[in-house]
Amino acid sequence: MTEEKVLDLNPLWVFGYASLLWNPGFPVTERKLATLRDYHRSFCMRSIHHRGTAEEPGLVLALDEMPGASCQGQAMRVPDHANIEVIEYLRERELISSAYLERLVELDVEDGSTVTALTYVIDPTHVQYVSGLELEQQARIIARSAGGRGPNSEYLWNTADHLRGLGIEDEDLDMLSARVRVLAAGGQ
């Protein structure tokens, strides 16, 4: 994908599936529930900046490619006058360690239409990519990790709460949330 293609998007839609839902960091003029096909939301990225450190990485959600899967989130429309600033902001935020790849994707939105949106997917060849962790292992990492943007548990709970508020079900996140609460309270 060329940088010019992204910069030419008008309107600019951004697909939020995790922290962009509750902390976009940019102005949003319209939000629509949306589904991205052939990707799933997964704690498959080691966080060494925002929710962990190089010495003790946390885990953050990423879009992991999986044919036949789908991920529900929100398509967020950026005000036309802010496109370039928002793209620059997102690149600084999301491409901090090059573990994400910038992509233009087609989203199925709640009104039956489709939109082209900017999103960031995990690079499965990157050193921060991790897959196949059991939920218990994920919970233990999340319960103990913190980084520049705060505790890893806060990231999990904010994302799970916001998804529930949107009516989006994610059983794995709900189970992780409950388990991390037990671990954070000193339980086993």
Image (cartoon, grey):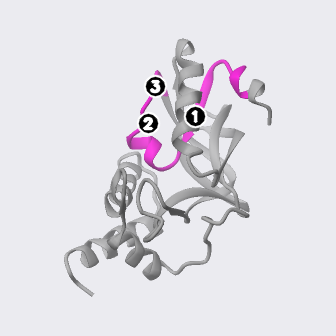
Magenta stretch encompasses residue 150: no
Instruction: Give the residue type at disc 3.
Output: Val
Q: Do the residues labelled 1 and 2 touch (CB within 8 Å)?
A: yes
Disc 1 residue crowd, few under 14, some 14–19, many 20+, Cα 10 Å? many
Circle nearer the N terminus (1, 2)? 1
**Which numbered disc covers residue 175?**
none
Tell me the quarter of the image containing the C terminus.
bottom left
Horizontally, residue 156 falls left or right of residue 85, namely left
Which residue extends farthest front?
55
Circle nearer the N terminus (3, 1)? 1
Asked if residue 154 is positioned above or below residue 145 in the image, the reply reads above
Q: Which residue is drawn at 46% across and 75% down?
A: 138
| Residue 158 locus on image (x, y percent) | 34, 53
| Residue 87 locus on image (x, y percent) | 59, 28
Circle 3 sits in a helix, a strand or a loop, which is it? loop
Q: What residue did someone put label 1 on?
A: 14
Instruction: Give the residue type at disc 2.
Output: Pro
Quarter location, residue 185 = bottom left
Q: Are marks 2 and 3 in contact (CB under 8 Å)?
A: yes
Which residue extends farthest left?
185
Tell me the quarter of the image containing the N terminus.
top right
**Which numbered disc covers residue 28?**
3
**Which numbered disc covers residue 24?**
2
Instruction: Give the residue type at disc 1.
Output: Val
Q: Residue at x 56, y 46 (%)?
A: 96
Q: Give the range drawn in magenta.
A: 6-30
Magenta stretch encompasses residue 26: yes
The residues bearing labels 3 and 1 have C-alpha atoms spaced at a distance of 9 Å
Disc 2 residue crowd, few under 14, some 14–19, many 20+, Cα 10 Å? some
